[in-house]
Amino acid sequence: MVNLVLVGAPGAGKGTQAMKISQKYAIPHISTGDILRDNLERGTQLGLQAKEFMDRGELVPDIVLIGIIKDRLSEPDTATGFLLDGYPRTFPQAEALDDILGQITKELDVVIDIEVPDEVLVKRLAGRRMCRCGASYHVLFNPPEVDGKCDHCDGELYQRDDDTEEAVKTRLVAYYAQTHPLIDYYSTKGLLRTVNGTGSIDDIFREICAAIDRIL
Ligand code: ADP
Ligand code: AMP
């Protein structure tokens, strides 16, 4: 049982690693980006509210995200642990998470920061292809076995609307201004483990597992 948060810039490999961690430790992968994209696709009120922010590469307002995470963490599958991917991204979100966890008598065990230089992030996002099941591929660095198809569910791969040059720039600015300061917040709490995110997917996964296993 482990309650963990993955942080890192857009394109750091959070989604890629989250899928593997969630399988190995049998904990739900909670990606706020996936939840928002699912709402967008279903045309819900939440999706409509979030769309303009997401397309521009801006953060969706805290109040919306805090509501999403509060509801999701109250679901029974989080009883044996959870993995947050893409939340928290601001101080108010981090403080709200502390409050929510306090109310349901849970605690974070570890926060893993995946570090990747900006020039690598930009190349990763430019070639990213996604599946609706949450799997993430890259046309050069991590291609699927069959072109355009997901290895896990055979779904059709697509390019995200916010993986454009303009939106990527905005997302990186938002990351450094609003999310990166959380690294100090979690470091001060003694929860932070930093992983170099430039190696192979399997090497990074081994490093993350070693960090998790040390606290289990
Ligand atoms: P995030 O969820 O942090 O935005 P993703 O997991 O979607 O990032 O990864 C971004 C892109 O980089 C994807 O195209 C993915 O296939 C690719 N990628 C992930 N990890 C690596 C890695 N270690 N080496 C090369 N490419 C990677
Ligand atoms: P991601 O899939 O994590 O890259 O998120 C895609 C987009 O969804 C982001 O660029 C934001 O617009 C929005 N989003 C996801 N998670 C959050 C969050 N915790 N706070 C604010 N916006 C978010």
Image: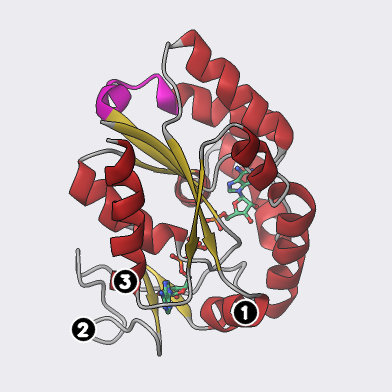
Residue 122 is tagged as 1
Q: Residue 5 magenta-drawn?
A: no
Three-letter amino acid code of the residue under disc 1: Val
Quadrant location of the C terminus?
Answer: top left
Residue that carries the numbered disc 2 in the rendered image = 145
Q: Residue at x 67, y 37 (%)?
A: 185
User: Distance of mark 2 from mark 1, alpha carbons?
Assistant: 24 Å
Which mark identifies residue 203? Answer: 3
Asked whether, in this view, residue 44 is left or right of residue 199, the answer is: right
Looking at the image, how many numbered discs can be counted on the residues?
3
Mark 3 beta carbon near ligand 1 (under 8 Å): yes
Q: Earlier in the sequence, mark 2 or mark 1?
A: 1
From what the image shows, is residue 191 above or below residue 6? above
User: Nearer the viewer's eye, disc 3 or disc 2?
Assistant: 3
Distance from disc 3 to disc 2, alpha carbons, whole Å, reads 20 Å
SS for callout 1 = helix
Q: Nearer the viewer, residue 144 or 184?
A: 184
Whether the residue carrying mark 1 lies under 8 Å from ligand 1 is answered with no
Q: Position of residue 3 (x, y in %)?
A: 38, 32
Taking the image as shown, residue 23 lies to the left or right of residue 51, namely left
How far apart in space, not on screen, are marks 1 and 3 (Cα)? 21 Å
Q: Which residues are magenta?
A: 72-80
